Amino acid sequence: MRADNPTFTLSPVRGNFKPSAPVLAGLLVVAAVAALQFAAIPGFDRAGLMVFDTYQRAAPRPYEDAAVRVVDIDEESIERLGQWPWPRTEIARLTDTLAEAGAAAIAFDIVFSEPDRTSPEKVAKQLAANDGNEALVATLSNLPSNDAVLADSFLLSPVVGGYFLLQEERGRALDLPSGMAWLGTPPAMVQPDYQGSVQSLPELQGSVSGLGSLSINKGEDGVVRRAPLLFFHRGELVPSLSLEALRVAQQAESILITTSDGSGETRGAPGAVVSVKVGDFEVPTNAEGELWSHFTETVPGRTVPAWQALSSDLSAEEKAELFGGQIIFVGASAAGLRDVVATPGDDRVPGVMVHAQAAEQMILGWFLERPDWARGLEFLLIILFGGALALILPKVGAVVGAIVGLTGTATVAGGSWLAFDNARYLLDPTYPILALVLVYAVQTLLSFRREEQQRAYIHDAFDRYLSPEMVRQIAANPHKLELGGEEREMTVLFCDIRGFSKISEQYEPHEVIDFLTGFLTPMCDILLERKATVDKFIGDAILAFWNAPLDDPDQFRNGARAALQMVAALDGLNRDMPNKSDQIWPDDVGIGIGMNAGLCCVGNMGSEQRLSYSLIGDTVNIASRFEGLTKQYGVKIVIGSALAEQLDGFALLELDRVKVVGRDAPDTIYALLGDEEMAAGTAFAEFLEGHAQFLSAYRDQDWSVATAALSRLSAFYEELGLSALRQTYLGRIEGLADGDLPADWDGTFEATQK
């Protein structure tokens, strides 16, 4: 009676996740990101702002002369004219100079809040207190104060004064020389309502043609990205310095503000600012009345040092050409005055430059805009791109899903950049990209958990029929029996016994096997202890590698230490094994080790019938060639430059530049002589220096100097077991010195043997 062959059928995995669970999870992620974007929580826009900063660095505003200049109180001006603060008479001289040159407006990014301590009456009081000359005291007391001189200068010039706004209640009320009007609901979205201020002296402030706020609103990260044009102070709307300078330059009477309902637009709520009009210029703003700053790179022609503006070396005609019809911003960049801010393109920009570039943008009509529809478009992209990936990914798998996600990311990011570069629109790509990334991550994690459940099911189904190891491999990777591999940065070691053919001739086959077992076992113990994967034995040779299948962040040093330990272990075997009667061991067994580092392809390789976990690649071939070079140079371990770069602190000796068999490109090879302790010795350092001098002379074809260096270092070569290396070079020099070398010979040796 014949029994039927048993059959096994895998049932669907019965886990916690239904087939629709990844899709549902992905859609929930999309909804969460969309809700976060819609809520516009303060601080969550930081990533988008950093993207806009990157755009500005990649494409700064091209500079155009907009009749705006900055007179800079820089380090050199302070050195030439004296430490700050300067006497107000000096500021008056600067003001008069600019006014006489025909400046359209002179805007001071400076507050003169305290009386000048160098005024004549102040000096007179000090002299009187110290029993000074009474006639001089009387004369000084009758002179006008420096502040009065400056006030007179301001009165005759188109000066725009400044003030700082404060949150705390402090200072007097502002008395603006101009008015502000608006169309629509009052601009209530301009925040906050400042209660205090730091202003210039009343006699100075009462003499100016305009007054503007010097305050600059920095972002939460301290970066200035927007220039406020409007502020509230104790319930009254006041302009910025740049806006007021533009008004004074045009001799306009007032500033007109248009809000959302006044323009027929809607910006979420009535009272959102749409634009600001001053004279002939209409400036679009955000709802808070801010201008998105688009900074230029540093332009020398825009800035004039204060000392130069005051210099008598410039004629009246030259000053008129430089300042005539210009809006002049006077500010300070000197380090001690600390008036610097961070912008998207520069960490140290004088604060006055923010006002000056805002005025330039308003004059040129060059505006960055975040349109009303920007947030709506970004919300739509979250839904479309995130939702599409959530629906597609569970069907197409992680690889295709990654391609789809990357394509969506590139589309969103590229569209955002093109909108900035071509239309100067600020469209934030971060939320749509965040939706794509999170959808991919969440759904991939869910798929991974489902696979883990499938592996558990395989264990339950096959544990009774297959070996535990085979079950483990199948469960870990169902595609384990497929051909293919992966590229990894790896360290490769070839070890070969010297003169193995002669050894084989001396013994019977079983004795040779005993000898190999006695040699290979301790060598493999060292390799495995140092986290190597022993790939295969090729007769008497060992091929091992590091960083596969498991990652080894210390692969290079593990490889070097393993090679050094193998050499030391062989010395011990040569000393101890001949004394054992039951072990075949030839006299003075030697080895050569070649090592290299680089990209390799590692994985299951072979045919459909027989597979082996191994590695291939140019790195492996070169390591094999390096092992062959140990014979020619009389050293035990030869490594390539790629590995040498990773072994900082080890005792390495540069051997030569070599073209190995089968390669056109040369490589610098090194002998690995010892570990960090050996490298730290003064004698070894002295030897390295002398050997480097020898190589330099050798490559320069200075044969007498090279030969002398080899003779001088002979004791070192002997002590380090490098006598054969010395003899190799002496013989090579003897042959090269009598020959005709090509003009481009650089000392590279071309190996002819593997």
Image: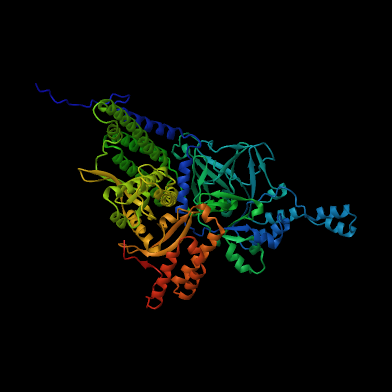
Residue 410 appearing in the image: no
Looking at the image, is 239 positioned above or below residue 470?
A: below
> Left or right of 439: which side holds 703?
right
Residue 691 appearing in the image: yes
Image coordinates for residue 610, horizontal then vertical, percent: 22, 43
Q: Is 441 or 288 nearer to us in this picture?
A: 441
Visual colour scheme:
rainbow
> Left or right of 69: which side holds 618?
left
The picture quadrant where one finds residue 452 is: top left
Q: Is 180 or 287 nearer to us in this picture?
A: 287
Which quadrant of the figure contains the N terminus?
top left
The picture quadrant where one finds residue 323 is: bottom right
Looking at the image, is 145 positioned above or below residue 481?
A: below
Image coordinates for residue 271, horizontal then vertical, percent: 50, 36
Image coordinates for residue 670, horizontal then vertical, percent: 43, 59
Which quadrant of the figure contains the C terminus?
bottom left
Image coordinates for residue 170, horizontal then vertical, percent: 69, 38
The picture quadrant where one finds residue 624 is: bottom left
Q: Is 187 or 1 nearer to us in this picture?
A: 1
> Left or right of 438: which side holds 45?
right
